[in-house]
């Protein structure tokens, strides 16, 4: 993860996983519970519960509860029972404390966790005490094991899986693939469009099996670092992640860790004995490789403190960036490796204990890791024109979050207090409009009731904090909005999004979005492409046209920081900024801890070369308000 000297990071949590932790319950398109993803690299933590008690991470607990919800859904169980497991999974996944730490041998302690009732607390107590959950084993045995795997297919939900099982006797992903070879015979009754969607969905599965999301990798690496520090003490002078994780790429493969130490065997011995380690693949004099219980592979290298700078630069990458740096070094008569610079003529080594020295040796400014993708940063560093990248602390407010009025898990006051604790000065409560398939979407009557609650809260806060009246209004398939114009006029700010019909053609979905952007009451277009990393591809939206119309109409575009969205992504956000389109960075929080997802939005913004000037919610509300088209007109 980035060092504090690079920019502030959220408080540590072991609760993050690959799927968004905040939607409970959410629309079908939004809520794809892929247990292999949620359990990081595989499903072993859920499929085969250990015979002996061990330390359970929040992500593994959440994966188990989520799988229970999946099984109950396939069985057609009571909706509220399913939601209870999903909600508990979401809260646990997003908790800033380890649930097993909260437990401390007493199930009553678990009931203090929002969404964890007596029944779930007792089941978790059994899991922590025995390493088994008999309820899970019981219901798992009631359905063919392969059914849940089919939920990994984009667009396939529990009802569809149950249909495959009960009507077609298809119980495995492989069986479905075989049936699709002759669908007229094997899947009689399914429409041609459904068949085509199934084929396309299955075709995307292989592309998402080897990488995990940034948030998953980041919090897990932080666990490893904390454990290693505790085990090694002063023997570890410095510890840092490297590779694509340090560059904050949206998805991460294997993990790379570097340690500066004069006692490599102390470090390596401690590393291979960490409680997270399932298997040791290799251990030498300066490097060890392990596979963790969650299935992730991690490489740790130990080097002398005097060589820290060159090693950190080398192992951070990217490959293309490093090639360019080495080429520049050679032009100056230097050979650069992970160990040092070496003068080509004399063979003399030049050690760099600090990474900034590595770049300074060849006349460059230090380049933030997020920019090291050979996309212009080399030239900018040579010309001393690197941007002053935005930082988490620059944000003054969050313009997308949710409360219990729709699909959130906290009150408006609790959300406001969570934001205040993180230094924010305002939030927009953007509960969903009525038309989206979300529990308790707001109609006009309930909207006005919510406004009264917000007015009372703002009166109490005075100048200390402001809650904005807002909404996440659905853009219907025909481009109209889900709420009447007179109601939209009463909001402080309106965020419009698409959740349904995301498989429309490029022309149709672009026309649909452009119509909404031209609406005088739409201030922000949220999570524009609709992507869910690893489970749903971006829509076919013509972003160049969207950027053009957004600039023309004064509509803001959002970078949604939710860990499974990060939408707009870095490439698209950079293009929008180049065209002059103003952006905002939001958390899409559904729980107070969800405001920490602003960090992942900032990660995308930094990779997109964005500065404070590109992001309007770095302004105080009174100044931001003046930039909205509803108040300009």
Image (spheres, rainbow, N blue to C red):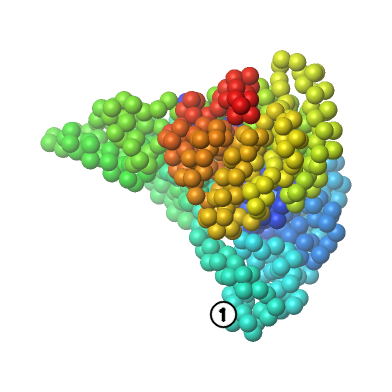
Q: Quadrant of residue 346?
A: top left
Name the residue furthest top: 463
For image coordinates 71% across by 68% down, the residue present is 161
Q: Quadrant of residue 39?
A: bottom right
Q: Please provide percent x and percent y for residue 327.
A: 23, 40
Task: Please name the residue that numbered disc 1 is placed on.
Answer: 181
Q: Please provide percent x and percent y for residue 496.
A: 65, 41
Image: 204 above or below 254: below
Name the residue furthest front: 633
Query: Which quadrant, please, contains the C terminus?
Result: top right
For image coordinates 53% across by 29% down, the residue present is 615
Q: Residues within 10 Å of mark 1 (few under 14, many from 20)?
A: few
Horizontally, residue 125 falls left or right of residue 535, namely right
For image coordinates 70% across by 56% down, the residue present is 28
174, 52: nearer the viewer: 174
535, 155: nearer the viewer: 155
306, 135: nearer the viewer: 135
Q: Is residue 29 visible?
A: yes
Q: Is residue 14 visible?
A: no
Q: Please provide percent x and percent y for residue 229.
A: 54, 34
Name the residue furthest bottom: 185
Disc tally is 1
For image coordinates 64% across by 49% down, the residue present is 479
Q: Please provide percent x and percent y for residue 500.
A: 66, 54
Query: Could you say whether the residue bearing mark 1 is in a helix, strand or loop?
Result: loop
Horizontally, residue 419 falls left or right of residue 340, namely right
């Amino acid at each position: 993860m980035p060092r504090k000297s690079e920019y502030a990071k959220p408080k540590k949590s072991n609760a993050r996983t690959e799927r968004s932790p905040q939607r409970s319950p959410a629309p079908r398109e939004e809520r794809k519970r892929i247990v292999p993803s949620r359990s990081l690299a595989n499903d072993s933590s859920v499929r085969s519960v250990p015979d002996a008690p061990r330390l359970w991470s929040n992500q593994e607990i959440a994966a188990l509860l989520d799988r229970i919800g999946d099984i109950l859904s396939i069985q057609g169980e009571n909706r509220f029972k399913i939601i209870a497991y999903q909600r508990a999974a979401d809260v646990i996944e997003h908790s800033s404390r380890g649930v097993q730490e909260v437990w401390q041998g007493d199930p009553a302690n678990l009931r203090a966790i929002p969404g964890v009732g007596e029944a779930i607390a007792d089941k978790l107590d059994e899991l922590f005490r025995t390493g088994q959950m008999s309820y899970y084993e019981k219901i798992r045995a009631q359905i063919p094991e392969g059914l849940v795997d089919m939920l990994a297919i984009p667009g396939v939900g529990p009802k569809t899986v149950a249909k495959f099982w009960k009507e077609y006797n298809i119980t495995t992903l492989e069986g479905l693939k075989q049936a699709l070879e002759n669908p007229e015979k094997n899947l009689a009754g399914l429409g041609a469009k459904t068949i085509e969607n199934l084929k396309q969905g299955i075709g995307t599965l292989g592309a998402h099996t080897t990488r995990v999301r940034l948030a998953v990798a980041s919090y897990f690496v932080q666990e490893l670092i904390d454990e290693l520090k505790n085990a090694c003490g002063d023997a570890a002078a410095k510890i840092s992640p490297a590779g694509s994780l340090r560059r904050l790429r949206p998805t991460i493969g294997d993990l790379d860790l570097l340690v500066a130490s004069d006692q490599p065997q102390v470090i390596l011995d401690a590393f291979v004995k960490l409680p997270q380690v399932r298997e040791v693949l290799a251990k030498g004099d300066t490097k060890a490789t392990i596979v963790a219980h969650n299935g992730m592979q991690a490489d740790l290298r130990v080097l002398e403190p005097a060589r820290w700078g060159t090693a950190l630069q080398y192992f951070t990458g990217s490959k293309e960036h490093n090639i360019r740096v080495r080429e520049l070094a050679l032009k100056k008569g230097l050979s650069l490796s992970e160990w040092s610079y070496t003068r080509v003529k004399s063979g003399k080594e030049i050690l760099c204990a600090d990474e900034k020295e590595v770049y300074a040796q060849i006349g460059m400014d230090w380049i933030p890791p997020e920019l090291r993708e050979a996309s212009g940063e080399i030239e900018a560093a040579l010309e001393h024109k690197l941007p002053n990248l935005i930082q988490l602390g620059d944000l003054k407010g969050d313009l997308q979050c949710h409360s219990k009025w729709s699909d959130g898990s906290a009150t408006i006051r609790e959300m406001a207090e969570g934001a205040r604790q993180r230094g924010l000065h305002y939030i927009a409560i953007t509960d969903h409009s009525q038309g989206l398939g979300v529990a308790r979407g707001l109609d006009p009557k309930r909207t006005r009731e919510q406004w009264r609650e917000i007015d009372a809260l703002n009166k109490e806060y005075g100048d200390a904090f402001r809650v904005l009246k807002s909404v996440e209004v659905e853009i219907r398939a025909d481009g109209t909005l889900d709420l009447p114009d007179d109601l939209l006029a009463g909001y402080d700010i309106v965020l419009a999004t698409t959740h349904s019909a995301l498989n429309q053609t490029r022309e149709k979905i672009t026309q649909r979005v452009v119509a909404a952007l031209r609406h005088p009451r739409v201030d922000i277009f949220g999570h524009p492409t609709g992507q869910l990393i690893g489970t749903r591809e971006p829509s076919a939206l013509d972003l160049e046209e969207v950027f053009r119309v957004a600039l023309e109409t004064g509509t803001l575009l959002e970078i949604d920081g939710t860990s499974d969205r990060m939408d707009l992504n870095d490439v698209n956000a950079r293009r929008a900024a180049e065209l002059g389109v103003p952006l905002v960075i939001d958390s899409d929080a559904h729980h107070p801890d969800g405001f920490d997802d602003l960090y992942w939005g900032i990660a995308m913004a930094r990779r997109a070369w964005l500065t404070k000037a590109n992001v309007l919610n770095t302004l105080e509300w009174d100044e931001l308000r003046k930039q909205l088209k509803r108040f300009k007109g």
